Amino acid sequence: MKIMIGFVNQFYTPQLNIGLLNLADSDFRWVTNERIEAATAHVHGVNGMLKVGDRLLIGYQSEPTTLAVFDHDFKLIHQKNCHDIAQLHSLCHFGSNALCISTGTEETHLIDLANMSDSLHTSQWRRMGKQSGRFDRNHFNSVASCEGRVMATCFGPKLHGNWVHSKNGQIVNLISGEVEKQNLHQPHSLKFHRGSWLVCESGTGRILGERGELIEVGGYVRGLAPISDDLICVASSAQRIQSRSKGTINLGLDKSQGQQKTAIHIVDLKTEKTIQSVDLSIHGAEIFDLIPMPDYQQPEWIGLLDPLEIQVSHLERQLKTQKKSNLIKNRFTRALRAFIKRY
């Protein structure tokens, strides 16, 4: 079993934003080459991934929002800048189409997949916010659809001007308008599994389920993918020390979560226990999305170079253009030391 991983806020290695993890041997590889780098020169991460037959639909963290279609070997098929979608978060199937969240306008948008190899037509489907325009008042961030139900997660209104301490998060039924779950601390990554929903409560490091599941994973949990009837894959991220929008220090996560790492965890739903964890902290701080790729035969080029060697090369490139950044220097040193230690 392989898991495709979408990283966000990769400001120091922006074009390293999709990784592939083999759960059998914990081998991690970056999905990147010159063609992908040329197509994603303006992005800083991946905010949504969706497998559509033998194609992959990727929603990038960029301005404007970029959607891209790749084939099974990660050859770029089509790419589109979507000026009507502000801060895309999450992708899900919706009949023969796809849905995504436009966080910056508090809307869901429909993506026509009928001719996705040649075009990606997008249109507004539902407005969640009360006002039109570019406002992110409740931070809607994930959407999921199953058997006529369409659900979305949001943080709810800000508390004291930010969402760090806000515990007003909700799971909202976008068809009926009903709130199905509330008082959540920064919910993300809503997914349906066997007809009921599972959600990451990022602020507490827990997975909650519609059937009463309550699983303690730890860390800032975000990114969830069922991989069998009884197993799910969950990502945890290191705490964002500094607010990306305000530059202030974040102190909002529960201290009970302990030391935080960026990792992939396999969780048994029957026992509600973590049975496998793979630490990916050296590769990136924040994971947003996961896709299981059970039958994926990765192209040989993905595994040609060591992932740390690629990181060192990308960080070195950043150092040349941003020499005064101590954060880049520190990350370069960490990656270089890890690379040397390995060999």
Image (cartoon, grey):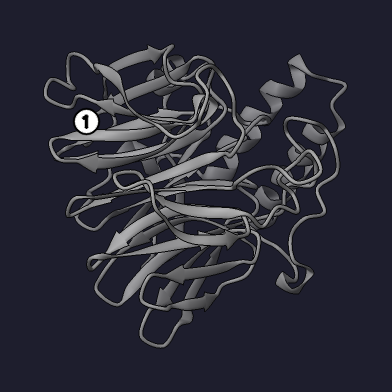
Q: Quadrant of the C terminus?
A: bottom right
Give above or below for 270 relative to 66. below
- Residue appearing at x 82%, y 40% in the figure: 330
Q: Residue at (26%, 26%) from the top-left corner?
A: 111
Residue labelled with disc 1:
71
Residue 288 shows in the view: yes
Q: Quadrant of the N terminus?
A: bottom left
24 lies above or below 129: below
Quarter of image, res 10 = top right
Tell me how many marks there are. 1
Residue shown at 75% from the left, 14% from the top:
321
The x, y position of residue 216, in whole percent, is: 57, 76
The x and y percentages for residue 172 are 42, 50
**Placement of 120 over or under 268, stated as above or below:** above
Left or right position of 97 against 279 = left
Q: Nearer the viewer, residue 311 or 260?
A: 260
Left or right: 193 as drawn, with respect to 303: left
Please say if 66 is above or below 128.
above
Amino acid at pointer 1:
Asp
Seen from this angle, which residue lies furthest bottom? Answer: 271
Give neighbour class at mark 1: few <14, some 14-19, many 20+ (Cα, 10 Å).
some
SS state under label 1: loop
- Residue 234 versus residue 282: which sits nearer the camera? 234
Which percent across, then down, holds residue 262?
61, 57
Q: Residue 79 or 159: which is nearer the viewer?
A: 159
Which x, y percent locates residue 57? 29, 32
Instruction: State whether residue 1 appears in this view.
Output: no
* Residue in the picture at 51% in, 29% down: 130
Q: Is residue 298 left or right of residue 262?
A: left
